[in-house]
Amino acid sequence: MSQRFSTDVLIIGGGAAGLAAALHLADTARVTVLAKGEPSSGSSFWAQGGIAAVLDDADRFAFHEADTMKAGADLCDRETVRLMVREAPDVIRELSTWGVDFDKEDNQLHLTMEGGHSHRRVAHIADATGREITQKLSEKVLDHHNIEIFHDRMAIDLINLNKVNGYPSACAGAHVLNTSTDRVEVFQAKAVVIATGGASKVYLYTSNPDGSTGDGIAMAYRAGCRVANMEFNQFHPTCLYHPHAGSFLISEAVRGEGGILTSAKGHRFMPRYDERAELAPRDIVARAIDQEMKKKGLDCVYLDISHRSPDFIKSHFPNIHEQCQRLGIDITQEPIPVVPAAHYTCGGVLVDADGRTDLNMLFAIGEVAYSGLHGANRLASNSLLECLVHAKRASKAIKPRLEHNFELPYVPKWDESRVKDADESIMVSHNWDELRRFMWDFVGIVRTDSRLERAKRRIDLLNQEVSEHYAKYRISSDLIELRNLLQVANLIVRSAMMRKESRGLHFNLDHPKTLDKPENTLLSTGSIRDF
């Protein structure tokens, strides 16, 4: 028998954005957090760089805004950028009161430099900022009597009241798979926050953990919400290239502290591509590396920080040093082999400044959302900033809505009466592999119209197979993720086909010029009322 749970606010996602929102809400509401796994399974935990904020007397809000707009290729929403930049210092101060101990030098915050920034403004905890923040937030959440966390839960689809006895459209919870029991549960709530992260697992090579399968974007789109600018997928320039490295990222801060990119023969190449060299924004650096590798037939390039002192390297990048040392690479003496990898989804569910989506009582925060902060490319260390600012703003917007004493209507349980157990899983695993491979080949760092058309044809065929399987057999976690990845891949390719220019992270050889007037790419299933 499937279980049913009721709460005031349901938060889907246990990373920095979801945990921060839970803490902001818990003093006045019952909060339920759903997580696929432990905190270490999310992208927030693995964020190395830090949080960008104007904290130095030599810096200005206007400088941070200008850097963000420039990195975003003028597609950022100026008002959103202004708001985020001005609220950034308060985020740092609030995290400090929650026990996050940022690195200091001479009793002042140590601010590092990263690509695309004109000033040192990245507050950090060595090279493991995300891990420290996530752990501290997790501890506070676990201690709060008004917050309940359910691990091993995967949301399948959002509940739109429009489908329940003709109520007006509003989000009232989600159907959720308990992956430890393989049973579907109903979680009802007065408000829902999706904080599920991005979709970089749609690509063969990614810096993201396995759970970054675009679940929130896919669910919100199916529920009738618009998505924006899905063609802008950020490829981090420097992922460790080693057969046993997994998805290990070499932080932007390594280049910020003097690391240089070279060929196998030690020749530096970035100054040929951009006057900012290694400190150019990520899209420029990633394309330069991609071009160098293809032009010279290289498996990787090299990032060299060995000219800095061993003590400096070990103190600033202890985790990177330890991981590379474990694989036989001494970064104090030799360069690090690196390749670009899919890293961040700059598009997402369209939201306003408070995280509101098109569907009443549904909010989206963090990487799952498109707020207008990142535009066509994300400035380094603006991601954790967006997570935490939006968590606070969305919570503030939700609280007044909970003051009304309204009863949630009864939501029917998940219907499994017409499905059966799958006799094999080869379809899911084969299609998963095929999807990620052709997305890497055809919808990667450099694109063409013909590659996009080829990808779209393959997506249509796979989608037909998966839809038939989804209708016939009981769901599994792998099937849910494959369904969502196909949905997101379709959104990425359709968005890329609509953009007849090259801008930011979207570079199309058939449309190399940048249009004078930047416009967002919006996709919708149609009005929520008709969905």
Image: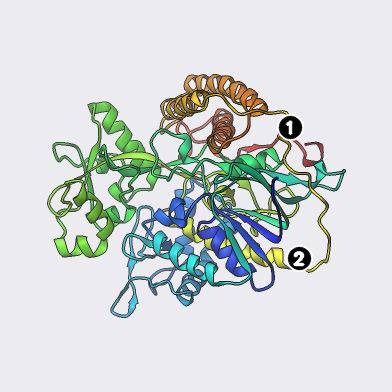
In percent of the image, x 79 and y 47: which residue is there?
Answer: 411
Disc 2 from disc 1: Cα separation: 35 Å
Q: Which residue is mark 1?
A: 417
Instruction: Give percent across and percent down for residue 197.
Output: 52, 49
**Disc 1 residue type?**
Ser
Residue for point 30% across, 49% down: 250
Q: Residue furthest bottom?
A: 107
Quadrant of image for the C terminus: top right
Give, as a three-letter code, the residue at label 2. Answer: Leu
Percent x, y for residue 144?
Answer: 58, 72
Q: Secondary structure at mark 1?
A: loop
For label 2, the residue is 402
Q: Residue at x 68, y 38 (%)?
A: 222
Which residue occupies the extreme right position in the image?
166
**Residue density around tag 1, few if under 14, some if 14–19, many if 20 or more, within 10 Å:** few
Q: Which dot, 2 or 1, sits closer to the camera?
A: 1
The furthest residue to the front: 1
User: Is residue 412 placed above or below 95 in the rendered structure?
Assistant: above
The one of 347 and 248 positioned closer to us in this rendering: 248
Say which element carries label 2.
helix
Write the residue at 23% across / 38% down: 301
Q: Earlier in the sequence, mark 2 or mark 1?
A: 2
